[in-house]
Image (cartoon, helix red, strand yellow):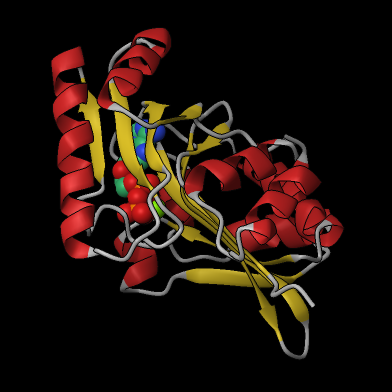
């Protein structure tokens, strides 16, 4: 499906929130790397996709109604065998049905496990005055508790992208810390510019969250994505 087909499908179902799978399909077309992700609608299918990907895999709830998937018991990381995948499939559906009885559930997404990297996040929200604004930060507590983030108005210049990365307090963590690999900062700049282009070309996108992106010394990959559309007029 191309970008407009994905958007049309979501709207035809009366939704504005895309699932992680739909969000990844959309941003992948903008040249943003995402972890390979496929929808399974049964435990057997989850196992067969896992075998095609190769173990270990990650399973997650695929529902537009579950925003914080791991808080709800909707994420299982590092599944190494068919048996673990089958059990994880049932456990995810059980947890979500209990916690969100009203949730529309598409199934469970199966994805390749990404090698650990430095977790960064990129977000977009729309400001009443400035329009789309991009946010950059380091994943986990640095964003959630310390609010160590930077903002720039779309469209970003190359210079904006560089400044956004360097002005966060956690920047030294990107340069290699306690044996962690240094991150390819130029690649992150390019990623910010790609997100800026994507946002500019798709005004129907109201909000975007890539949280987290695993950043490496060679490239970066978004392992979670969430897109929200404007209400259709
Ligand atoms: P949510 O933010 O909805 O709770 P995520 O999709 O972000 O769920 O998953 C929670 C955590 O699991 C991520 O922050 C990341 O650390 C880990 N994770 C998710 N997907 C992958 C993946 N494909 N490979 C490796 N780790 C992953
Ligand atoms: Mg996430």
Left/right of residue 203 with respect to residue 226 in the rendered view = right
| The residue positioned farthest toward the bottom in the image shown | 129
The spot of residue 87 in percent (x, y) is: 13, 28
Q: Which of 182 and 111 is in front in this view?
A: 111
Dividing the picture into quadrants, the one containing residue 155 is bottom right
What residue is rendered at 35% in x and 74% in y? 146
User: Is 167 on the left-hand or right-hand side of 160?
Assistant: left
Q: Is residue 23 visible?
A: yes
Q: Which of 90 and 3 is in front in this view?
A: 90
Quadrant in which residue 84 is drawn = top left
Q: In which quarter of the image is the N terminus?
A: top right
Q: Is residue 130 left or right of residue 179?
A: right
From the viewer's side, name the closer residue of 140 and 170: 140
In the picture, the quarter occupied by the C terminus is bottom right
Residue 225: where, in percent of width, then height? 51, 49
Rendered residue at 74%/53% (across/down):
8
Measured as percent of width and height from the top left, residue 232 is found at 75, 72
Q: Does residue 166 show up?
A: no
Residue nearest the observer in this picture, 89 or 79: 89
Measured as percent of width and height from the top left, residue 11 is found at 68, 60
């Amino acid at each position: 499906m191309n970008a407009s087909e994905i958007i049309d499908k979501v709207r035809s179902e009366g939704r504005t929130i895309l699932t992680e799978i739909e969000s990844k399909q959309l941003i992948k077309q903008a040249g943003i790397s995402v972890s390979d992700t496929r929808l399974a609608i049964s435990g057997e299918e989850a196992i067969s996709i896992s075998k095609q990907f190769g173990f270990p895999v990650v399973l997650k709830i695929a529902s537009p109604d579950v925003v914080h998937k791991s808080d709800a018991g909707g994420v299982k990381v590092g599944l190494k065998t068919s048996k673990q995948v089958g059990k994880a499939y049932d456990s995810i559906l059980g947890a979500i049905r209990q916690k969100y009885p009203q949730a529309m559930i598409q199934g469970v997404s199966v994805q390749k496990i990404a090698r650990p990297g430095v977790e960064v996040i990129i977000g977009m929200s729309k400001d009443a005055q400035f329009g789309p604004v991009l946010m950059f930060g380091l994943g986990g507590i640095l964003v959630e508790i310390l609010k160590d983030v930077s903002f720039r108005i779309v469209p970003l210049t190359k210079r904006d992208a560089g400044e956004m990365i360097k002005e966060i307090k956690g920047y030294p963590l990107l340069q290699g810390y306690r044996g962690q690999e240094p991150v390819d900062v130029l690649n992150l700049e390019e990623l910010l510019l790609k997100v800026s282009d994507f946002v500019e070309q798709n005004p129907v996108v109201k909000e975007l969250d890539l949280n987290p992106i695993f950043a490496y010394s060679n490239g970066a990959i978004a392992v979670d994505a969430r897109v929200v559309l404007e209400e259709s007029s």
